[in-house]
C-alpha cells in the first residue's frame, strides 16, 4: 500500500515553471558531485502545467500559491546539472528573470515555485534571498518575493559604471595581451552570435557574460571580475513594461564581440575604445 501511495503522489507532481530554464531538481547524490537525470517515467507521472486556472484533479489551492502569479507554460523540462539543489534553483530563476518569465512587479510564492521544481521550499527561499541581495527581487512578508521594477535610468547608470570599469582595463589589455590569446576567445564570441541569431535572450545573456568574463579574466584581478560580473548580471534584468525583444539589436550586439576581438588582435586602441563604449551605451546586454 505504501508503494501505491508513493506512485499516486508521483503522478501529482506538476511540471517545472520555466520551460527549458529548469528541470526536475533532485538533491545531490552521495556518490557523485553532479545531478543525474531522472530515469524515464510513465506518462502519468507528469501533469502538464495549466496556463490559467487550476490543474486537472487538483483544487484551487494547488493552482496558485498564496498571493502568487500563475506560472507561464513552456517547452518540456530538462534536468539542470549543478552541484547543489540551491545552485540549480538559483540559476533557473536567474534565467527566468532574464527571459521575462518572472515579470517585474509580480509576487511569487516560494512554496508554489518549490512544488513546480519538485523540491522543498527551503532551497527556493535560499535562492530568492540571494536574488534579494542582488537586487533582483524584494521580500514581501507573508506572501513571497516581488520582482523588482527597474527603470531605463537605472539601466543607463549601470552601463556608465560598467564603462568606467571595463574600458580602461580593455585598453590596458590591448597593449599587453598577445594576439594568440585573443584568438582563443573566438568561440565565445561565436556562441553569442548563435544565441542572438536564434533570438534566445536567456542564452544570449549567459554567453554574453561568459565572453566579457573571459576578456576581463586576462587582467588577473578576481575582485574586478566579481564586481564586473555583478554589474553585468544586473544590467540584463528586464525593465518595467519592457518592449518585445528586437532581434536585429541582439544580432548587432553580438557582432560587436567579433569586431572587438579583431581590434584587440590588431592592437587598434582607437577602435577598441569606440567599440567598448558603444557596446555599453547601445544595448541592454
Image (tube, helix red, strand yellow):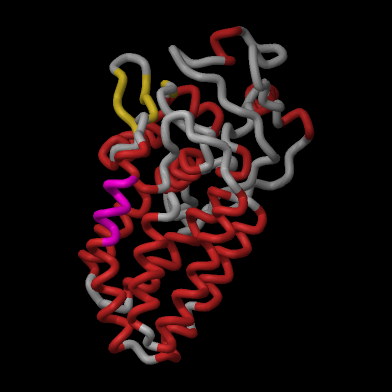
Q: Is residue 194 magenta?
A: no
Q: Is residue 130 visible?
A: no
Q: Looking at this view, is 14 or 163 the one in front?
A: 163
User: Which residue is rendered at x = 55% and y = 75% of the image?
Assistant: 187
User: Which residue is rendered at x = 76% and y = 28% of the image?
Assistant: 44
User: Which residue is rendered at x = 27% and y = 77% of the image?
Assistant: 219
Q: Looking at this view, is 164 or 66 the one in front?
A: 164
Q: Is residue 32 above or below residue 44?
A: below
User: Which residue is rendered at x = 47% and y = 17% of the image?
Assistant: 68
Q: Looking at this view, is 257 or 12 the one in front?
A: 257
Q: Position of residue 224 (x, y in %)?
A: 23, 65
Q: Is residue 60 above or below residue 65?
A: above
Q: Position of residue 243 (x, y in %)?
A: 53, 35
Which residue extends farthest right?
43
Q: Position of residue 206 (x, y in %)?
A: 48, 56
Q: Looking at this view, is 285 or 60 the one in front?
A: 285
Q: Is residue 48 above or below residue 80?
A: above
For the C terminus, the quadrant is bottom left
Magenta span covers which residues?
156-163
Q: Is residue 203 visible?
A: yes
Name the dominant secondary structure of the magenta segment.
helix
Q: Is residue 160 magenta?
A: yes
For the N terminus, the quadrant is top right
Q: Position of residue 83 (x, y in %)?
A: 44, 54
Q: Is residue 178 above or below residue 27?
A: below
Amino acid at each position: 500500500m505504501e508503494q501505491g501511495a508513493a506512485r499516486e503522489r508521483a503522478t501529482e507532481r506538476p511540471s517545472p515553471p520555466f520551460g527549458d530554464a529548469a528541470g526536475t531538481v533532485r538533491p545531490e547524490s552521495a556518490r557523485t558531485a553532479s545531478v543525474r537525470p531522472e530515469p524515464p517515467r510513465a506518462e502519468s507521472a507528469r501533469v502538464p502545467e495549466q496556463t490559467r486556472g487550476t490543474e486537472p484533479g487538483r483544487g484551487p489551492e494547488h493552482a496558485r500559491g498564496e498571493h502568487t502569479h500563475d506560472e507561464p507554460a513552456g517547452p518540456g523540462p530538462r534536468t539542470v546539472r549543478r552541484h547543489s539543489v540551491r545552485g540549480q534553483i538559483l540559476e533557473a530563476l536567474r534565467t527566468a528573470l532574464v527571459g521575462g518569465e518572472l515579470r517585474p512587479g509580480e509576487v511569487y510564492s516560494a512554496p508554489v515555485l518549490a512544488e513546480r521544481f519538485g523540491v522543498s521550499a527551503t532551497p527556493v527561499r535560499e535562492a530568492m534571498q540571494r536574488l534579494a541581495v542582488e537586487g533582483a527581487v524584494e521580500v514581501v512578508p507573508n506572501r513571497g518575493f516581488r520582482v523588482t521594477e527597474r527603470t531605463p535610468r537605472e539601466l543607463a547608470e549601470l552601463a556608465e559604471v560598467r564603462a568606467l570599469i571595463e574600458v580602461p582595463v580593455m585598453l590596458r589589455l590591448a597593449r599587453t595581451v598577445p594576439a594568440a590569446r585573443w584568438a582563443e576567445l573566438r568561440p565565445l564570441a561565436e556562441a553569442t552570435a548563435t544565441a542572438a541569431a536564434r533570438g534566445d535572450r536567456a542564452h544570449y545573456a549567459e554567453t554574453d557574460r561568459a565572453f566579457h568574463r573571459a576578456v576581463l579574466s586576462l587582467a588577473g584581478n578576481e575582485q574586478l571580475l566579481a564586481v564586473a560580473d555583478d554589474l553585468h548580471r544586473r544590467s540584463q534584468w528586464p525593465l518595467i513594461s519592457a518592449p518585445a525583444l528586437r532581434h536585429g539589436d541582439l544580432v548587432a550586439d553580438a557582432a560587436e564581440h567579433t569586431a572587438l576581438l579583431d581590434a584587440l588582435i590588431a592592437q587598434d586602441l582607437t577602435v577598441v575604445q569606440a567599440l567598448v563604449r558603444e557596446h555599453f551605451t547601445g544595448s541592454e546586454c
